[in-house]
Amino acid sequence: MSAETITSLLSFQPDAPELQQKREYDKEAREFVKQVNGLTPATFLKGADSPQDPLNVLDPTTNAIAYAFTLRHRIEAATKKSVDQLRPGGSLWNKLVLFLESFDPVQMRYAGEQWRKLVEYVELIARNEGAPALAIAPIRSAMFRLDPTTGTFTSTHLHFIHLCMETRSYKAALPVLSNYIHSLPTAIAKETLEDLEYSVAAADSVASGEFINLKSGHTAKISLADLQEYYVLGAMAYLGERQVHDALHFLEHVLVTPANNALNGLMLEAYKKWVLISCLADKSHKTPPRTMSSTAVKHCKNAAKAYEALAEAFQQVNNLPKLKAQVNAGSDIWAEDGNTGLVEELLEHQNRAYLSRLSRTYSAIPVSNIARNVGSSVDQVTTFVDSLIRQGLLNAHLEANDKSVAGAVLRFYLDPTQGPLAKTEKQQQQALFERTQRTNALAEQVKDADYRLSITKEYVEYLKRQKKKNGASGGGGAGVDVMDMGFEDGDLDEDIMGDLR
């Protein structure tokens, strides 16, 4: 590669004194992207594997834009010739992983298409090698570097959760799943993105929903169904980690999606799982969320009658034979829907519920008494109880009682500061502090979402309609709060959802 081209790739220096003003940084970054994008693919291949190799000269932490363009073209060329370099452990693979873990996040706000392509390449390479799990950590790092909240939904979110589910890497998905989705990519006016010091992409206070938009290149086209699929798969990942309340919360996101009096397969799948998981999480079958469409509720109940009957049997905690009969009667349905494991969990959960009720009456009880009441052997009950204690699902312990023919004794702890699940006051305070932090973060994200909504074309049109209505009623058009999101005009909901299609 010629010295002139290297100099060109190094021409954008984010720490230069003249770029400390965000508007100047924004202007120069956009111009630099246009400049590099205008270079031919062959330009980036010159000097490869030589002392003048741009991938050795450039630094992803300070020259992220130029590095991303160069790396993308090098990978595209290697797919046709030097495949060994792309394999895990190869030179290009190592550089790709290094980039995704260390790039300058501010520069990547301006090179969204390059960022997305490189993320897609790491998944493609890992799949071709028959080891898709290798792509999980680099992709997750890239998501968090670009957007520490991972709260603006992109096509990468869906690819990532697919990888985690395919490889059963449920725990690896939790850091992303635990962050709220607070924004969807939308169209934002160019004047808002480029002309104001505090709202340009390089601004310190800019929210990810502003620099990740429909034109930024960070995401492929997404639909409402993609978001629903993300929540369904996310719920299944939470189930894999036995976090049933979080799984229930994710499924409710799907159920309350605006349905326009129609029901798609994802909503029905979510409803069936929601019926089962609500029993596991709340020990009862809840009524559907109030914000769920009444038409959707009706269709779901009609299509999931077997699940409704199973939930009703589950609530009869003293009638275990009825629950077993319902489980056996619908075995083909559970298998066809892929919910056999969840249904079997209901049976186990009812036994746990029985033990939980015992803890309200007894401080200790012989295991033989429990076995007699549930119709199982002492060894089976002992093994079951021991597994619950080990999993942290029962605050109790088993005591050996050699002097009694009853065998082991199950002793309960009702005081949360005692027993195997005991928490100190400091631990309880820390848990409360973490919840407070998450609530405050969510409140800020809601404010950001309100602001972005207030500057959309659809919202401005809504304000005009409100002004006309107020004028017609004699109000003179006064009193409309531009940040009041409590509108009731259904047209705006449809317009906003249209941005996703």
Image (cartoon, rainbow, N blue to C red):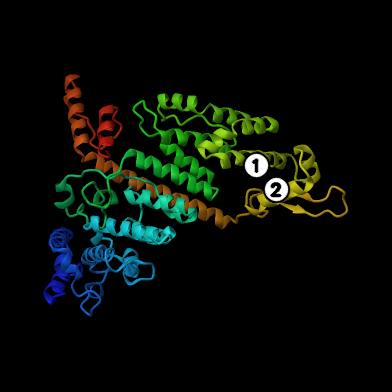
Query: How many circles with numbers are drawn on the protein?
Result: 2
Q: The residue under label 2 is which amino acid type?
A: Phe
Asked which quadrant contains residue 465, the reply is: top left
The crowding category of the residue bearing disc 2, from other C-alpha atoms within 10 Å (few below 14, some 14 to 19, many at least 20), is some
Q: Which of 170 and 291 is in front in this view?
A: 170
Q: Can residue 169 be seen in this view?
A: yes
Q: Nearer the viewer, residue 141 or 439?
A: 141
Label 2, secondary structure: give it.
Answer: helix
Asked which quadrant contains residue 186, the reply is: top left
Residue furthest toward the front? 81
- The circle on residue 348 is 1
Please give left or right for residue 283 compared with residue 358 in the image: left
Which residue is under mark 2? 384
Residue under the image location 57 percent in, 42 percent down: 341
Q: Earlier in the sequence, mark 2 or mark 1?
A: 1
Residue furthest toward the top? 473
Residue under the image location 72 percent in, 40 percent down: 358
Where residue 372 appears, as percent x and y from the top left, is 80, 39
Q: Nearer the viewer, residue 20 or 57?
A: 57
Q: The residue under label 1 is which amino acid type?
A: Glu
